Image (spheres, rainbow, N blue to C red):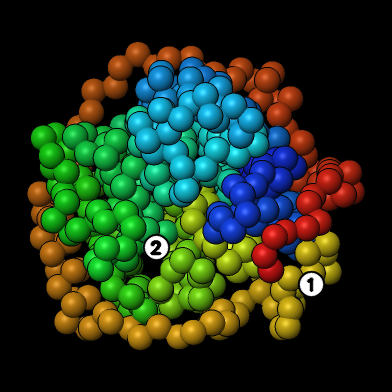
Amino acid sequence: MTYDNNQKVIYFWDSEVGKFHYGPGHPMKPQRLAMTHSLVFNYNLHKKMDIYKPYKASDHDMKRFHSNEYIAFLSRVTPSNVTEFTKYLPQFNVGDDCPVFEGLYDFCSRYTGASLQGAQQLNNRQCDIAINWSGGLHHAKKFEASGFCYVNDIVIAILELLKYHKRVIYIDIDIHHGDGVQEAFYLTDRVMTLSFHKFGNLFFPGTGDMFEIGAESGRYYSINVPFKEGIDDNNYHLVFKPVVEKVMACYQPEAIVLQCGADSLAADRLGCFSLSIKGHGECVKFMKKYNIPLLVLGGGGYTPKNVARAWTYETSVLVNEQINNEIPYSEFFEYFAPDFTLLLDKPCGDSVHNANTKNYLENITKYTHELLRNVENSPSVQMQYTPDSFLDDEEMEECKLSSKENANEFYDDTSKELEKKIDDK
């Protein structure tokens, strides 16, 4: 691995994406994005990055993966007319987990557009690392919503990366299996999917067994690392680091997409792992060292204050900046009580017994290495005609809100727009 302290980082900031609301009592809180942005800016991390207002994905963009009928449904259904679409709700798996809420299609357009634009700017070598914390919705399928996810921005971004890169690796550290992404690329060797997740006891989504390895041309290019509940930092990295090292050496990808779901943190509302914020961030630090084009996305995470902590810390890792453990004063300051620190050793909550024995973890690692013997030689891909980018240079420049040089102006103007309230602390 090579380490480059001068990697250029871009960050997508959308003042609207944190204002959407899935509904009362729903565990998915887009407001966590406003909290993350607030911390990022109050820690002055924006001075280390170029800030972009993201492109909004069109119907055409979303239909690069999803069916015409499904995207048409998302674009038309609203809370006020949902009764007119009653017969379609089961067909598209829209209901309790994936409700119809105000601005649903706009929400999808925003988070998908940011991931797509990040992929294009990586393709054009306008950056080395692109960060979109609003993305990473890995459960959405071609024909339906799933697990709080409606449009699979990850798949769409990877399709964009494949225009210029022969091989792309997708790495997922969300506690839930990245089933939507695995399914999309299950039959190809141009994308390797590597997911570290909880598996067993009917844990959602029920997929991600280590024996799901791909099929046809994609056989051996889906790698699953199924953990049991309670895994901690040390045990996680005893598997994560050697598996990733082996995958990177065998597959030799030309770009990385890293999904950083924060529900793998200890004390997550829907999770059962015991990772610390620093331990979660260690995965990000490890991938950054490979120094190849890197798209960093959000994902799950249902204790908003800890999601914001983790993604802010990981932003600091990506820009190679040491930041103070004391959380700076901001409009969300009260939500980080009582300690007001960024790096909790273990976020407060009931401890979970670590059911991952040393023998179990060794067997997972060994099995993964055996699978990878089949991909010792990275697949050769014949590059074809490359379609034009969806944004030209002038349009891209219009999306740019600030660079490092004028970051102070940007913060003064935009920090006031961030949401000041969130449903749950």
User: Residue at label 2?
Assistant: 175
How packed mark 2 is, by other alpha carbons closer than 10 Å (few <14, some 14-19, many 20 or more), is: many
Q: Is residue 263 above or below residue 46?
A: below
The residue tagged with tag 2: helix, strand or loop?
Answer: loop
Residue 209 visible here: yes
Q: Residue at x 59, y 58 (%)?
A: 25
Q: Amino acid at mark 1?
A: Glu
Which numbered dot is residue 402? none
Residue at image position (56%, 22%) is 76
* Residue receiving disc 1: 334
Residue 52 appears in the picture as rendered: no
Image: 243 above or below 111 = below
Vertical placement of 61 versus 9: above or below? above
| Camera-side residue of 335 and 46 | 335
The residue shown at (55%, 30%) is 82
Q: Nearer the viewer, residue 4 or 196?
A: 196
Left-right relation of 152 to 15: left
State the residue in front, 285 or 239.
239
Side of 244 relative to 266 (left or right): left
On the image, the x and y values in percent for residue 300 come to 49, 56
Q: Position of residue 353 (x, y in %)?
A: 35, 86
